[in-house]
Amino acid sequence: MNKNKKKNVQLIIDNNLCCGCGACEGMCPTKAIIIDITKSYRPVINETSCTKCGICYQICPGKGWPALSWARSLVDRNTYWDDNYGPAYDCFLGKSADDNIHLQAASGGIATSLVILHPRSGWPQVAP
Ligand code: SF4
Ligand code: SF4
């Protein structure tokens, strides 16, 4: 057995950790990974073409980077882990109070309204 063989993302897929980002397909040097989005966002690995270089596994976001400790150190030390959303500080529900934004947005327009309200956004340009 070749001692240099490394893991590929099949381990991620088998453990239901793939989010279908496509990074592995783009990075594989032997084109052994195919994502056929007409069927699924899950990668399919051609094990015959795979050299077990390990690149796909190395760059895969699904293998579990230390999201919570990262968020606690960079965002807020009170960040907690939510099984549905990952690292979370708090949870809110809302929609834009501006009907023009709300009715054109896919998710209630809250993100657009927050950008507009943010004092440093500089947008939209409004007449004094
Ligand atoms: S890089 Fe990981 S999460 Fe992204 S498609 Fe490949 S296996 Fe899935
Ligand atoms: S281990 Fe290397 S060759 Fe095999 S699928 Fe991943 S990136 Fe491609």
Image (tube, rainbow, N blue to C red):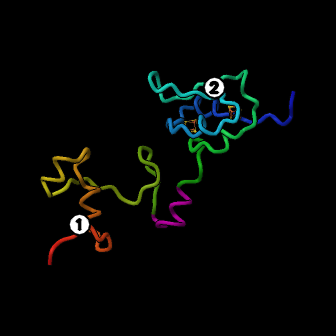
Give the side of residue 106 with respect to residue 56, left or right.
Answer: left
Give the side of residue 37 with respect to residue 48, left or right.
Answer: left
Quadrant holding the C terminus: bottom left
Quadrant holding the N terminus: top right
Mark 2 vs ligand 2: CB under 8 Å?
yes
Residue furthest to the left in view is 99
Residue 74: horizontal and vertical position, in percent? 52, 66
Disc 2/disc 1 C-alpha distance (Å): 47 Å
- Which one is closest to the eye, mark 2 or mark 1? 1
> Which residue does the image show at 23% across and 47% down from the upper left?
105
In this rendering, the answer to whether 44 lies above or below 7 is above
Q: Which mark is residue 36?
A: none
> Which residue does the image show at 66% across and 39% down from the upper left?
57
In this rendering, the answer to whether 102 lies above or below 117 is above
Tag 2: amino acid? Ile
> Which residue does the image show at 23% across and 66% down from the upper left?
124
- The residue closer to the viewer here, 112 or 14, is 112
Mark 1 vs ligand 1: CB under 8 Å?
no
Q: Secondary structure at mark 2?
A: strand
- The residue closer to the viewer here, 77 or 100, is 100
Residue 31: horizontal and vertical position, in percent? 65, 30
In the rendered image, residue 76 lying in the magenta stretch gets the answer: yes
Q: Secondary structure at mark 1?
A: loop
State the image quarter where residue 58 is shown: top right
Tag 1: amino acid? Pro
> Which residue does the image show at 53% across and 56% down from the upper left?
68
Residue 39: horizontal and vertical position, in percent? 46, 21
Which residue has dot 1 on it? 124
* Dot placed on the residue nearer the N-terminal end, 2 or 1: 2
Which residue has dot 2 on it? 45
The residue segment tinted magenta is 68-78
In the rendered image, residue 64 lying in the magenta stretch gets the answer: no
